[in-house]
Image (cartoon, grey):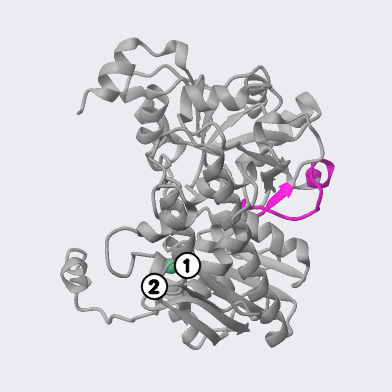
């Protein structure tokens, strides 16, 4: 099959190399990290057979330490609860994580006594009596529902307190297991640094807790921790298998994860004029002022981010101080569940001004706690938020915008959410961005330095040009 598809690119005569799923995750976590030596923890649903692996990285060597195999999987355990709480497996896990702070971890004992057996070193065994994923197409069976005394939640139905408590409980159990693993990994390796990848490493609440414990001095998580990052890891694993020396950069070598496609300014301008869309040049200062006044803006600049997070190339930006901004964005644009707050961006140099810890967080992989109650749109009920620190090196355009915003308002915090509507991926091309802009109540779109005002777009453009095709 690979050869057949590669032949479309005349690559069918090339040599094929195989990198195991967890080796790819481990390589994606260790090689771009800023560490010469580090312990590596990979946690996901399942690849070939491995579901949890630990490694020791030293220079360009990556040696396996331990492995847990399918069906015993932390990722699948979390997915089973995602399914039980009425969200979609393999994409709704972050909703479950977002729901957890609204509940109390009432069912931790029930889960630990019946569903999962956890050892002191963090290794674990799932009790398969309650799960169905090894035999059928669903994650859990009737016995699981009987254990909790409630049926699986109907998707899109009102979320009652029971499911919030279940979310809090499984989040707590996941944290307990991972913290045990991390502690054991420290004992075994005795190194200062930890790298992480695999879908479970997208759980930024767990990552925040790992950092809080200070078991490892520094923690670095691959921005594309899910399986997309496996492509990068497989390439790195092969590269470092050869006769090369490893380049280690002071922060990390992901280059802000800006590895995706881009459109030049002239390409952007051509598209706008071909579509007969009225636009003008716009400075970051003007843009900052529009946001300050309450406009919600689609922000499209440079190369697209690689991985699941919008880090400032394909983002929707708004003023985090407006009291009901979360509601406005949810209803008018994102159309997503109201319990999920948006994420803040902050100038890296001002991080400590607003947040409890003082970390570098360029890839939004850790939750922290905000010190001020002035930003309701980005704060969860427990005061936590998934923050991105913005530096000149990693996100130059985002940095300029925040800098101008700070000059104007004295604050350097804004809302950043991915540029897409619910159920669609993040916009990639200029045309995707325009299409999303036309179908939502975004006030403006900023496209590589050009500004389009929704008020200048005709009904015809909105209805026919962008809905006409299908
Ligand atoms: Fe994976």
Q: Which residue corresponds to the image point at 42% horizontal and 54% vertical from the top-left? A: 145
Q: Which residue corresponds to the image point at 70% horizontal and 60% vertical from the top-left? A: 209
How crowded is the residue under tag 2: few (<14 C-alpha within 10 Å), some, or many (20+)? some
Q: Which residues are magenta?
A: 350-368
How crowded is the residue under tag 1: few (<14 C-alpha within 10 Å), some, or many (20+)? many
Residue 37 in view, yes or no: no
Q: Residue furthest right?
A: 353
Q: Position of residue 374 (x, y in %)?
A: 77, 29
Ligand 1 within 8 Å of the CB at mark 1? yes
The reply to whether the magenta stretch includes residue 361 is yes
Residue 295 in view, yes or no: yes
Within the displayed image, which quadrant is ligand 1 positioned in? bottom left
| Label 2 close to label 1 by CB (< 8 Å) | yes
Magenta region, mostly helix, strand or loop?
loop
Query: In the image, which disc is placed on residue 44?
Result: 1
Q: Position of residue 455 (x, y in %)?
A: 46, 11
What is the number of callouts on the image? 2
Label 2: which secondary element: loop
The vertical placement of 403 against 245, above or below, is: above
Residue at which label 2 appears: 47
The N terminus sits in image quarter: bottom left
Q: Which residue corresponds to the image point at 46% horizontal and 79% vertical from the top-left? A: 23
Q: Position of residue 259 (x, y in %)?
A: 48, 55
């Amino acid at each position: 099959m690979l050869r057949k598809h590669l032949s479309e690119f005349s690559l069918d005569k090339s040599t094929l190399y195989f990198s195991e799923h967890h080796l790819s995750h481990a390589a994606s976590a260790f090689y771009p990290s800023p560490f010469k030596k580090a312990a590596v923890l990979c946690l996901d649903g399942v690849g070939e057979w491995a579901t949890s692996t630990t490694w020791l990285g030293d220079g360009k060597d990556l040696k396996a330490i331990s492995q847990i195999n399918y069906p015993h999987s932390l990722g699948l355990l979390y997915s089973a609860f995602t399914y039980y709480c009425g969200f979609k497996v393999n994409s709704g896990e972050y909703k479950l994580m977002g729901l957890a702070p609204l509940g109390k971890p009432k069912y931790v004992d029930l889960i630990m006594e019946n569903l999962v057996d956890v050892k002191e070193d963090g290794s674990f065994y799932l009790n398969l009596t309650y799960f169905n994923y090894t035999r059928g197409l669903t994650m859990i069976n009737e016995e699981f529902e009987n254990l909790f005394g409630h049926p699986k939640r109907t998707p899109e139905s009102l979320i009652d307190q029971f499911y919030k408590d279940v979310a809090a409980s499984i989040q707590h159990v996941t944290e307990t297991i991972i913290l045990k693993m991390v502690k054991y990994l420290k004992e075994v390796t005795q190194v200062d640094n930890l790298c992480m990848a695999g879908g479970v490493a997208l759980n930024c609440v767990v990552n925040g807790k790992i950092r809080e414990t200070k078991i490892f001095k520094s923690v670095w998580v691959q921005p594309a921790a899910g399986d997309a990052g496996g492509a990068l890891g497989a390439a790195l694993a092969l590269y470092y298998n050869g006769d090369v020396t490893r380049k280690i950069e002071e922060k990390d070598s992901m280059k802000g994860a800006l590895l995706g496609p881009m459109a030049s300014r002239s390409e952007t301008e051509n598209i706008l004029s071909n579509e007969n869309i009225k636009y003008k040049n716009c400075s970051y200062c003007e843009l900052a002022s529009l946001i300050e006044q309450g406009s919600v803006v689609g922000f499209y600049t440079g190369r697209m981010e690689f991985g699941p997070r919008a880090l400032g190339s394909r983002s929707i930006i708004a003023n985090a101080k407006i009291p009901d901004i979360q509601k406005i964005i949810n209803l008018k644009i994102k159309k997503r569940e109201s319990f999920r707050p948006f994420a803040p961006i902050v100038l890296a140099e001002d991080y400590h001004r607003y947040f409890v810890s003082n970390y570098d967080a360029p890839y939004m992989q850790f939750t922290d706690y905000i010190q001020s109650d002035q930003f309701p749109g980005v704060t969860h009920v427990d005061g936590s938020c998934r923050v991105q620190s913005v530096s000149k090196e990693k996100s130059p355009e985002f940095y300029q915008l925040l800098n101008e915003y700070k000059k104007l308002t004295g604050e350097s915090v804004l809302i950043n959410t991915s540029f897409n509507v619910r159920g669609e991926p993040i916009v990639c091309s200029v045309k995707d961005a325009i299409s999303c802009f036309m179908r939502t109540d975004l006030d403006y779109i900023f496209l590589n330095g050009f500004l389009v005002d929704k008020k200048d777009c005709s009904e015809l453009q909105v209805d026919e040009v962008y809905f006409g095709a299908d």
